[in-house]
Image (cartoon, rainbow, N blue to C red):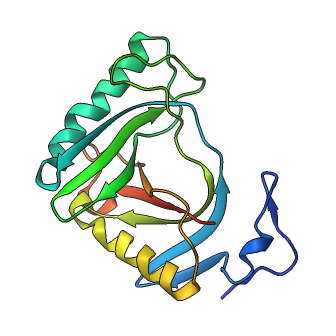
Amino acid sequence: MIRFGAPLIVLGVSLASCSSIPLKSEIDGFTIETKVVQPKPAVTTRKTVKLANLAAAFQVQIPKTFIYAQTNGGEFKGQPFAVYHSFSEDEVDVEVGCPLKAPIIGKGDIKANPMPGGKVAMTSRFGPYQNLGKAHVAMDAWFEKHGAERNGPPWEIYVSDPSSTAPDKVRTDVFYPIK
């Protein structure tokens, strides 16, 4: 296990205060890394939906943000993402969006909210979206094992396009903000 020694400065932020948190570790078959990521300009839309309807909501909301960006001068920079503001057994408050090269103005239910950033623990999951829960369970175990504190809602970046990628190769990056 790698541990912080001398203060590490990443993109101007010191991670020295996280001295007991490893830079990289393995939990339940997942490699979890700590790093600092920069927020990115984005347009998003947020909804509370039944968990059973989450995939259908994504099929509407993600294209909606992309179409809005395209028709309002936005230039894409990255893959779609979702921020999970709250999650229960049957309902989820989720904000989905697309990152942009530069900010644009939102309108109506499309907001000019940045893609999150800051100190995070992150992992990548390869496989169908139905199995993404395993990455979140591993993150929960990582927080418990290392005594780390959460600092906001988790988010996912959908790196692979499932319409053109084999199901077992679909990559999703999962991020949890840490104090």
Residue 58 x/y as whole percent: 24, 40
Residue at screen point 44% across, 11% down = 72
Question: In the rendered image of this protein, does residue 6 appear above or below residue 112?
Answer: below
Q: Residue furthest left?
A: 52
Residue at screen point 59% across, 70% down = 33
Residue 119 x/y as whole percent: 64, 60
Point out the image quarter for the C terminus.
bottom right
Residue at screen point 39% across, 16% down = 107
Side of 81 where 122 appears, left or right: right
Residue 145 x/y as whole percent: 52, 88
Viewer-side residue, 48 vs 41? 48
Point out the image quarter for the N terminus.
bottom right
Residue 152 x/y as whole percent: 51, 57
Question: In the rendered image of this protein, does residue 45 appear above or below residue 106?
Answer: below
Side of 169 where 150 appears, left or right: right
Q: Residue furthest right?
A: 6
